[in-house]
Image (spheres, helix red, strand yellow):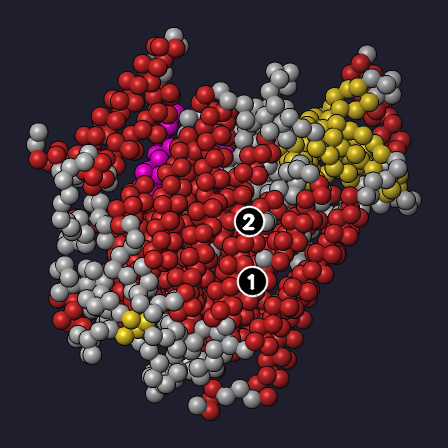
Amino acid sequence: MPVALRQPGWYRALATSLLGVAFCLGLTTLIRSLMGWDPLIEWSAIATVSMIGVPFFFLAGLGAFDYWFYWMSGRPTRAEDHSTHGAHSWRDYFKVNTDHKVIGVQYVCTTFIFMFIGGLMAMLIRAELAAPGSQFVDGQDYNSLFSVHASLLIFLFIVPVFAGLANYVLPLMIGAPDMAFPRLNALSFWLLPIAGTLMVSSFLMPGGAFASGWTAYAPLSTSQPLGQLCFTLGVQFAGASSIATALNFLVTIITMRAPGMSFWRMPLLVWANFATSLLVVIATPFIAASQFFVLLDRTLGFHFFDTAIGAGREGNVIMYQHVFWFYSHPAVYIMMLPGFGIVSEIVSVKSRKPIFGYRMMAFSLLAIVLLGFTVWAHHMFVSGMQDWIRVPMMVTTAIIAVPTGIKIFSWLATLWRGVLHLDTPMLFSLGFLTMFTLGGISGVMLAMVPFDIHVSDTYFIVAHIHYVLFGGSLFTIFAGVYYWFPKMTGRMYNEKLGKIHFWATFVFFNLTFGPMHVVGIQGMPRRVADYAAQYSELNLAISVASFMLGISTLVFLYNMVNSWRNGPKAEANPYKALTLEWQVSSPPPIFNFDNIPTVVGGPYEYGVPGAVHGIFDKPSPQPAAAVASSSHEPA
Amino acid sequence: MSSRDVTKADVVRMLVIGAVASAAGIAIGLSINWFPTAAATQAGPIDTFFDIMIFLSVPVFVLVTTIVLFAVIRFRVRPGEEDLDGPPVHGNTRIEIVWTAIPAIVLSLLCVYAATVLSDIDAAKADQLKITTYAQQFAWSYEYTGTDGKKFMTDQMFVPCRPTTAKQDEGAPCDGRQLSLDIKAVDVIHSFWIPEMRMKQDAVPGITTHTKINPNRIGTYPVVCAELCGVGHSAMRSTIHVVTPAQYTAWLKLNSKAKTG
């Protein structure tokens, strides 16, 4: 066998994937012949089994399981082998790598690719909606576009990009050499391209891509063409990735903090990811279950959601929504709490002040985790569930605004009398503060049952979710990417382009999503390819603004790519921040710290005379240049 | 440092600017023509409730924005301050209690108000007209009991409403029987919505859902499917005709004969 096929990598992955297809084809055909089903070769069955099986063959070929297989086979122990740790050339970013910094970059780049694909779909959606009637796409294709758009941006962008940013900075922040389970970390990442490829490739399926929305309500989803399975199974892979990463974060945070790094000395980004990981580990299995129900109904004739009258089938359609939202409401916080962490870091550093009310900031995160599990049915006020539950769910939903309010007010108090450095990360953080407030306000409005009855499933919902996930989450993601760009790439981004990006995004974001509140209340339902003529003027304005918003992201893309290649070299600590990730070179040494630091104080003691967060064993830190030159050698 | 000190005059100025901005925001918020024409009694309390929420929300947004803008203008780094740090304030228990308690109280009161509005719009009236609504991909149909006591199906919804003024045509205010709708879905989930009447209820396969509407304006209004139901979702529309009792009786008679005769 050629060496290329024996070594882990893309050649072997291709070979094992082909093997996987053959295996799934054989297995399906064997079972069908044993059961005596006709026809023997059923392509949709083979495709279904392949979508489940081939990814594992691919991962095995790529090398995600090599080390575990080695140990499982009872072979002799071998010395620490760091050959798959750290990136020595760009090629290493395309391999199974155990370095959390490489994985962090892999995550962020991959997820942004899916953001651009999903964003492009948004452009097509707005092109279709620029005028009433049917212009570019028919009903099914339109339904596919918004379904894949939402699924990509939720499951392949916002949820994992936060995991990617945290992957990079969290171990550095707590003074750890890596994540607790580096190989699991690598596997978590490689599940993502699989999930994303499944979802994007659903456009190639007979019958088109999945078209039942990112919510995939049964029984619509159980009666859709094959493309639906790309969602059903894509979510499983993305969900498994999410759960594994969350476990990794929890164990890393609990067990791998540097000496002296007590919970009350952890940066709030670490707290935020601790809270998020709790949510992920508890909630994500529920969406997995909901999608397994759909899979079983659709492929094996189960009757979870089959209510065929007279056939004695007692399926329960509303049950899907309960199980789905028991994950998908906490998922809103999974997509927001890490952003809270990012904003806390930036607002404190850029205001040159300690974060206001540090402990309340941490407690409010935990309060959101707890309350986040008690509000799911506010998505179901008109679903036909029992009436009495509506008011309790309204109350819990309103109350969850209290810990969120505490956070907003504490950030404002942190700004107060600070020395504000208004660079791009800070601008996006301040933009987040104002825009997320609007998203929170419309969220409280939606919690109110009588109002929700009217606006449920309208463009008011579309406006709200984009104020929360774009004005909220994406603003914090942009803030975080700019903020840690010097640390991750060793280069400075272009400040001027960053500011242009911010202002263009801020203005066109509001022009795009602001008017959607109005058309929603006026009576335009969501998820429609066509609409009544009375909404045409506002929709045209929304579409024009959305195209400008789309163009604004190209400024970001250019800035990132160009700065990464040609930007000026970054110092170790360009912002004079106290947290540990800034106390090492940019990018950090391969094992993060040549000496594990000892933490002696809080992370945000700006303005406190003589305050120190972490100390390193050596009396004087190495010059940045010396550290940088040794950064690619094992410590 | 002096430029960072906040004087009483600054606070007064912020309060004035905030009050003016709030007033302007509320005025704009209330002047926007948010809702479609109101054609049911349910619209009254819901629309008023929304106005109250505008009234409460605008000051919250203005508060956050004012502080952010004031901070940006007054506290931004100036030449020579590159190495300056802010005052090391870590917190203030009293103010933290205040900004926990006040939102909690306001939100609780809002919930109480919402609950009363909900019971208001859900209240059953003695005189009800029962109609069974069927939703299927991609059409609505309605089952009535005809003048001869037999049931018939129609794809247009007609409901009687007695004009309360001399005006009898489109737009006339009226008072009539409460519609009591039993809603059923034949295939997938749909959602029955009349934007002009504000009420919405999913149609769910396997169960019968209910909603009550009190029409109070003569006219025709669209019935919209609000839950994604497949390829024809955006075309799944029907019409509700709110007509005088005489017109309704005539329509009912005509249909009873046509459908059963």
The residue indicated by pointer 1 is A403
* Residue drawn 69% across the image and 60% down it: B108
Does residue A175 lie above or below A307 as drawn? below
Mark 2 and 1 residues: CB-CB less than 8 Å, in contact? Answer: no
Image spot of residue A410 (x, y percent): 51, 71
Please state which amino acid type lies under the numbered disc 2: Phe
Horizontal relation, residue A401 to residue A121: left or right: right
Q: A134 or B27, which is in the foreground?
A: B27
- Mark number displayed over residue A373: 2
* Residue drawn 29% across the image and 43% down it: A187
* Residue drawn 13% across the image and 45% down it: A78
Q: B166 or B57, which is in the foreground?
A: B57
Magenta span covers which residues? A192-214
Number of callouts in the render? 2
Secondary element under disc 1, as helix, strand or loop, is helix
Q: Chain of mark 2?
A: A
A194 in magenta:
yes
Q: Quadrant of the C terminus of chain A?
A: bottom left
Q: Quadrant of the N terminus of chain A?
A: top left
